[in-house]
Image (cartoon, rainbow, N blue to C red):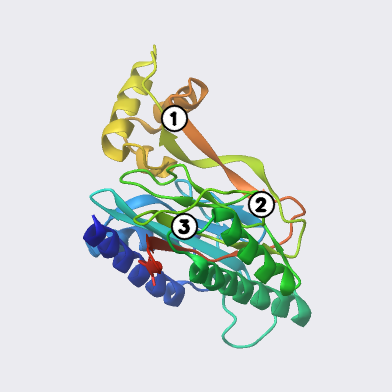
Amino acid sequence: MIEMYEKSGKIVSKVREMTVDYIEENMKVLDLVEFVEGNIKKLGGEIAFPCNVSINEITAHYTSPQGDETRFKKGDLVKIDLGSHVDGYIADSAVSVLVGMDDGEIPENQTEEEVETHRRMIETSQEALENAISTVRAGVEVGKIGAVIEETITNKGFKPVANLTGHSLEQYILHSGISIPNIKEKNNHKLEEGDVVAIEPFVTDGVGRVGDMNETYIFRFLRDRPLRMKQARKLLEVIEEDYRNLPFAGRWVMDRFDGNKNRLAMRKLVSSRAIYPYHVLKEKSNAWVSQSEHTVMVEPDGCKVTTE
């Protein structure tokens, strides 16, 4: 088990580094997503969840739909959240970047002060992650991890996103029950040796909360349901067999059978609660957000970061 987590982590770490070098101004988001997911497979992993590419105030759960024409603009603050698994043992990591800023020029629609704020947000989410990791060991209360994250972020003049959390992982289960808060809260649950958790601070200069958008591009199998529509039954069988309990992208299944019928079938599966839709999340005051994330394995006197 430990070996599988470590192998997944090495794959994610490598692909994350490749992706930071690959992203550029005017690139299609879809091209970046396919680059990430393709390289996870090339390196011997399986995709644990669709690559999330969330831009500026979009905070989480955006992955390209089929035929996505969205392109990166100079100065965009992009959060890239990726995951791999080996035999179901998952590594989950995220990094934030500013697109096309190596030349030092300020984008036309931003001020120098705004660009500097966004740079500091990225640095702050990374610092909050490192400080949180330094507290992890068997017996630590998860509420204390959140307190360290919040203190780090507020000391830099920003706010954590209060209603997003890190999470524990188990075989084939991305969110397995333990939440790792990004704020100080009374939570006495203690981590145990062998726990695997993803810690992911989100930093903003806005109100520090996210809300659901209407768009949904990521889904997860929930349960078998009685379905009259033949296409929906066939699609649900494919989803359960191919993705188990792991999240999947709508674009992954649109080419199965007939595309138009599949769109209707997906709506049927959502409305019948056979699959769960992950709504795209946006910061409520439309402020920009940064994110950093690593997966760690809890040890008696510390933890092992699998995705460094």
Q: At which x and y percent is residue 49?
A: 39, 49
Q: Where, quadrant-wise, is the C terminus in this rendering?
A: bottom left
Classify mark 2: residues with Cα within 10 Å, few (<14), some (14-19) or many (20+).
some
Residue at which label 1 appears: 275
Q: Amino acid at mark 3?
A: Gly
- Decide: marks 1, 3 in contact (CB < 8 A)? no
Q: Dot 3: within a 10 Å radius of its alpha carbon, few (fewer than 14), some, or many (20 or more) residues?
A: some
Circle 1 or circle 3, nearest the eye: 3
How far apart in space, not on screen, are marks 1 and 3 (Cα)? Answer: 36 Å
Instruction: State whether residue 155 appears in this view.
Output: yes
Quadrant assignment for the N terminus? bottom left
- The nearer-to-camera label among 3 and 2 is 3
State which tag comes first along the sequence, 3 or 2. 3
> Type of residue at label 1?
Ile
Along the horizontal axis of the image, is 178 left or right of 35?
right
Q: CA distance from mark 3 to mark 2?
A: 17 Å
Q: Is residue 21 above or below residue 34?
A: below
Query: Which label number is shown at residue 185?
Result: 2
